[in-house]
Image (tube, rainbow, N blue to C red):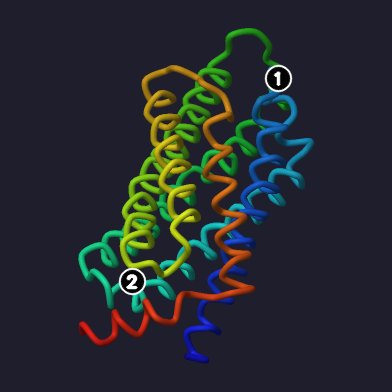
Amino acid sequence: MNSNKKTARIVGVLFLIATAAFMIGNGVLESILNHPEFLAKLYPDRTKVIVGIFFELINSAAVVGIAMLMFPILKQHSEAIALGYFGSRLIESALLIVSILSPLVLITLSEEYITSGVSGNSYFQTIGNLAMKGHYMAFEMAMLVLSLGSLIFCYLLYKSKLMPRFISVIGLIGYAALLASGCSAIFGYDIGLILYIPGALFEIIFPIWLIVKGFNSTAIDSGAVKN
């Protein structure tokens, strides 16, 4: 039981780290990448870009840690879902890492763009726009994988009663909204950040509950008995 309580607290802390790191890293990167003249800003602001990438890497590492720690607990209730969630978080982490490769490439491109003194619709801007599209596409794919994996995760939480069911319901609503947002973005419809709110709420309530209360020990014991 002490081991499960410790695992719950670590998972809770990792969730909070992942959320905070993502918000900081994404905020820093987007402040530069969303600028109309991003090619002119990237190289001069390269320190900020590297800081943003660093926080994104922290998020990716935390995501893998969550997957590894949750697997043995989820496996007691459904091995298929446990494997699905584990795999989805690994894929999510890999896609997030792919998405941050573009800003790294763009730093060098920005340097060449500034040095050349080219303006207007140059090939630098064409390459830059393609790299930006790759960045956003990889990110949206990561969000799709996150939402699908987390939907089955929240379903198992609801079914197993590892957490209070109202928290699981918030997660189901949140990740369904995230799935809708990701699908719409991939097809070219920008709904904005409003559909991120329910999922963000879950990723705050869930880890705080884990840190303070932990998993439902009765549900863990019943899962262990089945196995």
Give the amino acid type for the residue marked by disc 1 in the picture: Glu
Q: Nearer the viewer, residue 105 or 97?
A: 97
Give the amino acid type for the residue marked by disc 2 in the picture: Leu
The answer to the question of whether label 2 and label 1 lie on touching residues, with beta carbons closer than 8 A, is no
Q: Nearer the viewer, residue 109 or 100?
A: 100
Q: Secondary structure at mark 1?
A: loop
Total numbered labels: 2
Q: Where residue 43 sits in the image (x, y, percent)? A: 72, 36
Q: Estimate how packed mark 1 is, as few (under 14), some (14 to 19) or many (20 or more) residues with alpha carbons within 10 Å.
A: few
Q: Residue at x 47, y 68 (%)?
A: 66
Q: Nearer the viewer, residue 47 or 75?
A: 75
The dot on residue 28 is none
Q: Where residue 101 sits in the image (x, y, percent)? A: 52, 45
Residue furthest to the top: 120
Q: Is residue 99 above or below residue 213?
A: above
Q: Residue at x 41, y 73 (%)?
A: 68
Front position among marks 2 and 1: 2
Q: Is residue 4 above or below residue 34?
A: below
Q: Quadrant of residue 94?
A: bottom left
Q: Quadrant of residue 184?
A: top left
Residue furthest to the bottom: 2
The dot on residue 74 is 2
Identify the residue position indicated by label 1 in the image.
Answer: 37
Instruction: Using residue 107 as the reference point, say whether residue 178 is left or right of it.
Output: left
Q: Secondary structure at mark 2?
A: helix
> How far, Cα to Cα, is label 2 from label 1?
47 Å
Q: Residue at x 44, y 35 (%)?
A: 177
Q: Estimate how packed mark 2 is, as few (under 14), some (14 to 19) or many (20 or more) residues with alpha carbons within 10 Å.
A: many
